[in-house]
């Protein structure tokens, strides 16, 4: 199924009985059945749907160098790299994109990408916990992510 726009994207997600929070700026938060919270952004000016998930918040400032090195090492090893570290907000996140054509977004491609994102997030958790300690719940990470800066800034083109 090809989704022609943001409204169709939200409708398809909701029809799959995935809990959502819709924002007016083309961002929808998904509470996946795996427990992960992932945000999607549909920006009509670029031919991709952006996917981002806050993984770890509250990184100690004195750990910044080590976290930067850990993120770089993990990205080198991952089949689907996309980890990032915001040194200002002290947040580790995962970000990737799903291409879309002039006709729209292929729902099967989005589903495949979300599965890979979840596998990647779950796969890097042990390494992040080894480096920084227990990871907060996805909901706590998302709330901190929102509080630090508008989530759209992390998804800017």
Image (cartoon, rainbow, N blue to C red):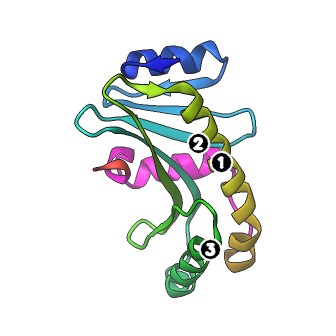
Label pair 1/3, CB-CB below 8 angstroms: no
CA distance for labels 1 and 3? 15 Å
Q: Nearer the viewer, residue 34 or 3?
A: 3
The answer to which of marks 1 and 3 sits earlier in the sequence is 3
Label 1 sits on a secondary structure element that is: helix
Identify the residue under disc 2. 113
Magenta-colored stretch includes residue 150: yes
Badge 3 element = helix
Q: Is residue 7 above or below residue 30?
A: above
Instruction: Name the residue located 52 percent from the left edge and 61 percent from the top edge.
Output: 82
Q: Give neighbour class at mark 1: few <14, some 14-19, many 20+ (Cα, 10 Å).
A: some
Where does residue 99 sit, x and y in percent of width and height? 41, 40
Q: CA distance from mark 2 to mark 1?
A: 5 Å
Is residue 104 highlighted in magenta? Answer: no
Query: Mark 2 Cα within 10 Å, few/some/many (few <14, many 20+)?
Result: some
**Circle 2: element type:** helix
- Magenta segment: 133-154
**Which callout, 2 or 3, points at the residue further toward the start of the chain?**
3
Q: Determine whether, in the image, residue 24 is placed left or right of residue 135.
A: left
Residues at discs 2 and 1 in contact (Cβ within 8 Å): yes
Front disc: 2 or 3: 2
Residue 23 at x, y = what percent?
39, 28
- What residue is shown with label 3? 74
Q: Which residue is mark 1?
A: 116
């Amino acid at each position: 199924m090809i989704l022609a726009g943001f409204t169709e994207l939200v409708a398809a997600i909701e029809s799959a009985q995935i809990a959502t929070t819709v924002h007016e700026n083309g961002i929808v938060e998904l509470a996946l059945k795996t427990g992960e919270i992932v945000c999607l952004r549909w920006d009509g000016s670029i031919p991709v749907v952006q996917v981002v998930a806050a993984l770890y918040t509250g990184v100690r400032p004195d750990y910044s160098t080590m976290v930067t090195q850990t993120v770089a090492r993990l990205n080198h090893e991952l089949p689907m790299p996309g980890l990032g570290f915001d040194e200002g907000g002290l947040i580790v996140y995962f970000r990737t994109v799903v291409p879309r054509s002039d006709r729209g977004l292929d729902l099967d491609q989005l589903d495949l990408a979300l599965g890979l994102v979840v596998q990647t997030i779950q796969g890097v958790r042990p390494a992040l916990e080894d480096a920084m300690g227990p990871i907060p719940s996805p909901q706590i990470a998302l709330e901190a992510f929102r509080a630090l800066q508008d989530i759209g800034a992390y998804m800017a083109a």
